[in-house]
Amino acid sequence: MSISFDKALGIHEKALGFRAQRAEVLANNIANADTPNYKAWDLEFGSVLAAQAAKSQSGGFAGASLTHEKHISIDTVEIADPSLRFRTPHHASLDQNTVDMQIEQSNYAQNAIDFQASFTLLNSKFKGLMSALRGE
């Protein structure tokens, strides 16, 4: 009898990866706060979750299938992350930069809390699996 980590860990593994990826995007926004014409980016968890669900149901990329042998396989084409979106600024800046430091710092702090929560949940799942393997 084998253990399926996908079933045992649930969505927490993917959520942890998403939170790490979002931390990179938010840190990049903060680093470019003074760059003229820089557009702030953000990742949407709902979009990532929907894309993962559609991908798992279709067995590949969401809604994509080959209908002719000369079509290019979706595996060979690099597709931009569908969950990565520009952030709409609340107020205009003179240099066309859309980074609002207060929002970015707030989102980064909230993302760090969510990352820690996902990490704690994964840690408890692994502890449960370890005690199950030990027969406790």
Image (tube, grey):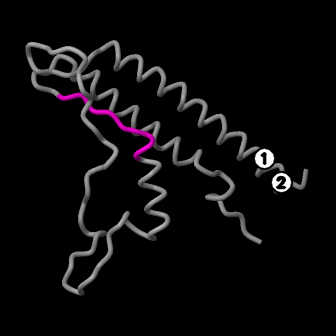
Residue at 58% from the left image edge and 30% from the top image edge: 116
The percent coordinates of residue 117 (x first, y second) are 61, 31
Residue at 29% from the left image edge and 79% from the top image edge: 66
Name which residue type carries label 1: Gly
- Using residue 94 as the reference point, say whether residue 8 is left or right of it: right
Pick the front one: 120 or 69: 69
Within the image, what quadrant is residue 118 found in?
top right
Instruction: Report the residue marked by disc 1.
Output: 128
Q: Secondary structure at mark 1?
A: helix
Find residue 2 and name its label.
none
Tell me if residue 42 is in the magenta stretch. yes
Q: CA distance from mark 2 to mark 1?
A: 6 Å
The percent coordinates of residue 38 (x first, y second) are 15, 27
Q: Which residues are magenta?
A: 39-47
The percent coordinates of residue 18 (x first, y second) are 45, 42
Residue at 45% from the left image edge and 51% from the top image edge: 50
Q: Secondary structure at mark 2?
A: helix
Crowding at label 1, few (<14), some or many (≥20) Cα neighbours within 10 Å? some
Crowding at label 2, few (<14), some or many (≥20) Cα neighbours within 10 Å? few
Question: What residue occupies the far right of the structure in this picture?
Answer: 136
Q: Are marks 2 and 1 in contact (CB under 8 Å)?
A: yes
Instruction: Report the residue marked by disc 2.
Output: 132
Within the image, what quadrant is residue 1 found in?
bottom right
